[in-house]
Amino acid sequence: MKMPPAEKITIVVPTYNEAANIRELLREIGKVSENIGERELNVLVVDDNSPDRTADLVKELDMINVYLLERKRKEGLGRAYIDGFGYAIRELGSDVVFEMDADFSHDPGDLPRFLAEIRNGFDLVSGSRHIVGGSIPGWSFHRRLISYVGNLLAKEILGMQVSDCTSGYRAIKTSLLGEINLEEINVKGYAFQMSLLHSAIAHGARIKEIPIVFHRRRGGESKLGLGDIAEFLAELVRIRFELK
Ligand SMILES: Nc1nc2c(ncn2[C@@H]2O[C@H](COP(=O)(O)OP(=O)(O)O)[C@@H](O)[C@H]2O)c(=O)[nH]1
Ligand SMILES: [Mg+2]
């Protein structure tokens, strides 16, 4: 009997100055992938020409199943994901893509829990820090406030029935991404997470939130800036009033 082809999974990891974390992260993902069974697991690092030579470290590691997409300049998290998803679909033939940060805030050990829900038939599985079992230990009041207000506004203004709209740990079926016109998501930075989720809901996607513990980043610094917060607010208004 002919076996069905193994599910192809690609974890897309955007990086900007993640030299302190990237090697160890790729090794840890490698360990988890040994335990996920009949699936092909790739990692795609999408680097924006990081001055700390993150991309060179990935090349030096020379690991199988690790791919590198190098972009010329820092264009934001959203653009990195749009390019990364395109590459994962066209070049790697992925059935499922993951979003994952490079700084260990997202525990690679959680990957099998996401995949189990994809197997259960969900199109998009999103890690939530704001449901029972989820948490953000060690986050400053300032970061908690940004996250809280962002989610509150997305719920109030867009009516999104999701507990964590800005989560960046997700598994997404590429069949869903094929329906959403990613190029129309015209945001550069972190607002991409909320916009993508909004588009997925609009396309009738089956969405599941699972609890995650969002850890403090291991090395390096956060890139979240005021520009990202301004873009997030502008994007809420744009979606609400269907502006182009
Ligand atoms: N390629 C790329 N990656 C980015 C950019 N901005 C942030 N990242 C990556 O996106 C992930 C989340 O960013 P981070 O600074 O940790 O955000 P925080 O966790 O909200 O503080 C990390 O892996 C970053 O390296 C960017 O402009 N381009
Ligand atoms: Mg982080």
Image: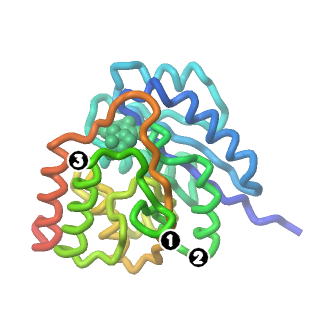
Q: Which residue is mark 2?
A: 121
Q: Quadrant of residue 152?
A: bottom left
Mark 2, Cα crowd under 10 Å, few <14 / some 14-19 / many 20+, is some
Please tell me whether residue 203 is drawn above or below residue 33 in the rendered image.
below
- Per the image, label 3 sits on a secondary structure element best described as helix
Mark 1, Cα crowd under 10 Å, few <14 / some 14-19 / many 20+, is many
Give residue 86's position: percent from left, percent from top. Answer: 43, 50
Q: Which residue is mark 3?
A: 142
Residue at the spot 53% in from the left edge and 26% down from the top edge = 58
Give residue 13's position: percent from left, percent from top. Answer: 46, 42
Which mark is first along the chain, 3 or 2?
2
Give residue 110's position: percent from left, percent from top. Answer: 59, 54
Indicate the amino acid at tag 3.
Answer: His
Q: Quadrant of residue 94?
A: bottom right
Q: Is residue 80 visible?
A: no
Distance of mark 1 from mark 3, alpha carbons?
33 Å
- Per the image, label 2 sits on a secondary structure element best described as loop
Residue at the spot 36% in from the left edge and 77% down from the top edge = 203
Indicate the amino acid at tag 2.
Answer: Gly
Q: Which residue is mark 1?
A: 123
112 or 66, nearer to the observer: 112
